[in-house]
Image (cartoon, coloured by chain):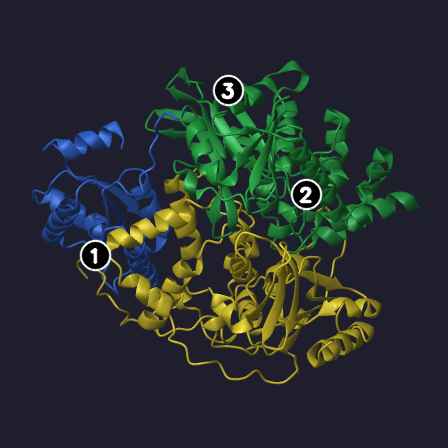
Chain colours: A yellow, B green, C blue
Amino acid sequence: MNQVEETLRQEVAKLLEDGTIDVFVGHEAASLPLKTSPCFVRSPKEVDRLVWNRICTSNLATYLPQLFKRPVGLKGEWTPPKVGVVAKGCDSRSIVGLIKEKQIPRDRLFIIGVGCEGMIDRHSVGRALGVVGLADAKVDGNSVQVIGTDGREKRIDIADVLAASCRECQHREAVLSNLTVGEAPSSAPEVSHYANVAEFESKSPQERWEHWVGELSRCIRCYACRQACPNCYCEECFAEETAPKWLGVTTDLSDVFVFHLGRAFHQAGRCVDCGACVAACPQGIDLRLLNQKINKDVEELFEAQVSLSLEEAEALSSFRMEDDQSFMTEP
Amino acid sequence: MLEMTLDKSKVQEFLRLLGQNRRLFAPVKDRMGTKFSEVADPSLVCLDGLNTNLSLKEVVFPQWETLYTFEEDQANEVKLAAQETLLFGARPCDARALELLDRVFTWEGIDDPYYLRRREKTCVVALACNTPGEACFCSSVGGSPVGEVGADALAFDLGKQLYLRALTERGEALLKEASTLTEKATEEDKQAVQQAAAEAEKQLQPVPIPEDLAALKESFDAEIWEDLGQKCLGCGTCAYVCPTCHCFDITDETKKGVGRRVRSWDSCAFSLFTLHGSGHNPRTTQAARYRQRVLHKFLYCPENFGEAFCVGCGRCITNCPAGLDLRAVLERLGSLAKVT
Amino acid sequence: MTKETNEKMSGDGWEPRIIAFLCNWCSYAGADLAGVSRIQYPPNVRVIRVPCSGRINPLFIVKALQTGADGVLVSGCHPGDCHYISGNLYARRKFALLKSLLEYVGIEPQRVHFSWVSAAEGARFAEILGKVIDSVRSVGPANKMIKKFEEVA
C-alpha cells in the first residue's frame, strides 16, 4: 500500500465518522488486472476497499450528479447527501464544470485532491500484447510487468502506455479541493500541446474525411463514450430524442457522424480532456481527436481554458464584442 | 463423422477454396485484439487470438436491418435472400451462442424470417481453445473450450496442423470440398486432440453459477443490485459485445413520403429502454436495469428456454468501462441464495 | 450513390439546394426587403425563419447537411443590433467552432456560410446569396453526410 492510499483511507474514515460526509466516491480494485471500479463507501469500516494507484482512470465526477437526485417515487422530505470524492486534476475540473452547470452543489461536496502523474491506458497495454489477453500485471515504480494469456511476460514502461490525455495533461493537481492528500506531482513534461490536432489539420480534406469514415465505421453506438463522460448528464440525449428526431438508430455512417459531431459539439468549451470517452470505447476510437480540436479552437479564438475555476464563465456562455469573425462569409 | 488434418501452411489455400462459393468470415487482427469480419484475402486471417473483441452475432443478427420500406400507404417487403456463409475460427462459446439465439428466433413456433434467412445459410467451423482468455468461464455455464454445440465442424490447433472434425452433414460436406488439401486423421492425432481438450478444460477457473431459480427470484429486492447499479454507467457495451443478448428496438425512418422500418440492437442498460409513450418508466434506477440484465440471462431465460443465456465468453467483463465483473456478481448471488 | 445524386451529378441540370436560417428581426426582413424591392436572387434557397441567430442549434446545420442540403447559410443581426441584445454574439462563438469542426472532419467549408444582414440590406442579402450559391456550386452536390435510403436486403 502506498502512502497516498493509506492517508486517503484514514481521512475518509475520519470524514465518515464525524459525519462530514455520508458517502465517499473513490476507486477500488476490479477483478481484472490493470482495471479499477468506482467504489461507494458509506461506513468507516469499508475504507480499506479504497485504492489509489496508476490505474484510477475513471473520471469519478461522472458518478456525482446521480447522488444528488431525489430518488424517484420518494414521498416526503429528502435532504441530499453530503458526498466526498477523490479527485485528480481532470476529475476536479469536471467537478468545477458540474458545479457551474448546477448539477452538483458545492456545499455538499468534500473534495480530496490527489496529485496525478498520469494513468495507464489499458487499451495501450492490450496493444502491446497483440492478439492475446492480459492474464496478470503488476505495477512496479515506473514500469509494469505484464503476463499475457499465452504465458509470455513483458516489462513495459509506464510512459509508453500512459493514456494519451494524461500525456498532454497540464493540470495534474485538483483545481478545487477541501483537502489535498499526498505530495505535489512532478511538473508536467513539456509536450507540444495539441500536437495530434495540428498534425491532423495539416492533412488534406479528403484524408481527414477518410480518417473519420474509418474511425466512425467502428462505432457500435453503445454510448459508452457518452455514459462515461461527466458532461453527458442529460436525462434524454439528442441521440435518442424522437421529437425532433435528430438521427436514426443505425450504424449508417451518416447517423454515426451526426451522433459524434453532435456529442463533440455539446462538449464545446466544457471538455476537460480527461480521456474517459477514449478509455470507455470498446472499439478503441480516438474521440479525443474531435474534442481536442474544439478545445484548441476555444483556446485560440476565445483565449479560454475549460473549468479551471468556479468564477470564470465558460467559453460558450460568454462572448466579447471583438470576437473573431474571420470565419464568416460576410461579417 | 469425418476427421481430418490440415497442415497449417495450407490454411490459406483451404480458406480460399472454401471461400469461392460463399462469404467467408474469420478473425482478423484489429487494434482491439481480433475482430470477426468478412475476409476477401485469407492471408489476413489470424487464428492466434482468443475471443474476438466483438461477438459474431452480427453476422446472423446485424446491428440494424430494414424490415420493410413504405411509400405513403403502401408497404414493400425487402428481399430475404442471403448468401451461403462460412464462419471459420469461431470460438466454441460463440458457436454455442448461435444455438441459443436460434431458440429465441424460433420461439414457440414463431420463426423470425430475417434471422433465419442468414442463419440457415451459415456454416460454422469452430476452433477449440487451447488456453483460456483473461475472463473466460465457459465451462461454468454449461459450455466447454472444446464444445461442439452450434458448430458444424470443430477444429483443434495442434501446433503444426489443424485437426478438423465434422459434426453435422453440412460440416461434412464442407470439409469434403477441400479434401484435396487434407489428410485423414491418425490415431496419434486423435490422441493429441484428446490431450489438448483435457488440458484446456483444466485451465479454466470454475465460477459458481446460481442455479436455484427460486432463490434467484428471491434476490429481486436484494441490496446487491443497489450496490452494482450505482457503479453501472448505463452504456450498452455489455449487451452489444454479448453473443447472446438479442433485444432489439423497432423504429421508423421517413424522408419525403418514403420510409423504412428498421430493427436495431437495444440494451436493457439504457434508461430509455423501458420508457413508455406516456412518460412512465417502470425501471427507474440503474440498479433495476442492471438486475434485469443479470436476471434475464440467469433466471428468465432458463425459465423460457431451458438454459442460461450466457456462454462465458467474458466480453462484458473485459469491456465494461466501470470494471463490473459478471463472475463476481454471480458469485455474490450464489452466496446470497445459500444464506436465504 | 442514390439515384437522385447520380442524376444531379451527371446532368447539367444540378442546382445547389441551400437552406438559409434567417433571424426574424434583421436577416429575414432583409430578405423580405430584397423581395419587395424586386431585387432578383436565384431560387436555390429555402428560407427557415428563426427568432434569433442565437436560437440556431448547431445540430440544425448538421441535420440540414444530413437530409440533403448542399449548403447552409445562417444569417443574423449585425453585432450590437440583436433584438435580444446579445443572442448573435453567443451564436457567433458557436458558429466559429462549428464551421471549424466541420472543416476538420473533411466537410467542404464552401458549404457552410455565416453572415450578418440587417433589415435595410435587401440588396446586400441578394448579393450574399449569389456568393453563397457560387461557393456551394464550386464543390458540387453534397454527398458526405447525406443519409441514403437504399434497399438493404
Taking depth in this image into account, of A137 and B77 the one nearest to the observer is A137
Q: Residue drawn at (53%, 77%), measured in percent from left and top?
A: A172
> x%, y% of residue C19?
24, 43
Q: Nearer the N terminus, badge 3 or badge 2?
A: 3
Which residue is denoted by mark 1 in the rendering?
A: C115
Taking depth in this image into account, of C1 and A291 the one nearest to the observer is C1
> x%, y% of residue B21?
41, 23
Q: Amino acid at mark 1?
A: Ser
Q: Which of the two discs, 3 and 2, sits closer to the camera?
A: 3
Q: Residue drawn at (36%, 72%), measured in percent from left and top?
A: A299
Image height of B124 relative to A132, above or below:
above
Which residue is denoted by mark 2 in the rendering?
A: B289
- Cβ–Cβ below 8 Å for labels 1 and 2? no
Taking depth in this image into account, of A185 and B55 the one nearest to the observer is B55
- Horizontally, residue B212 falls left or right of residue A200, namely right
Q: Disc 3 on helix, strand or loop?
A: helix
Q: Could you confirm whether marks 3 and 2 are on the same chain?
A: yes
Image height of B175 relative to B265, above or below:
above
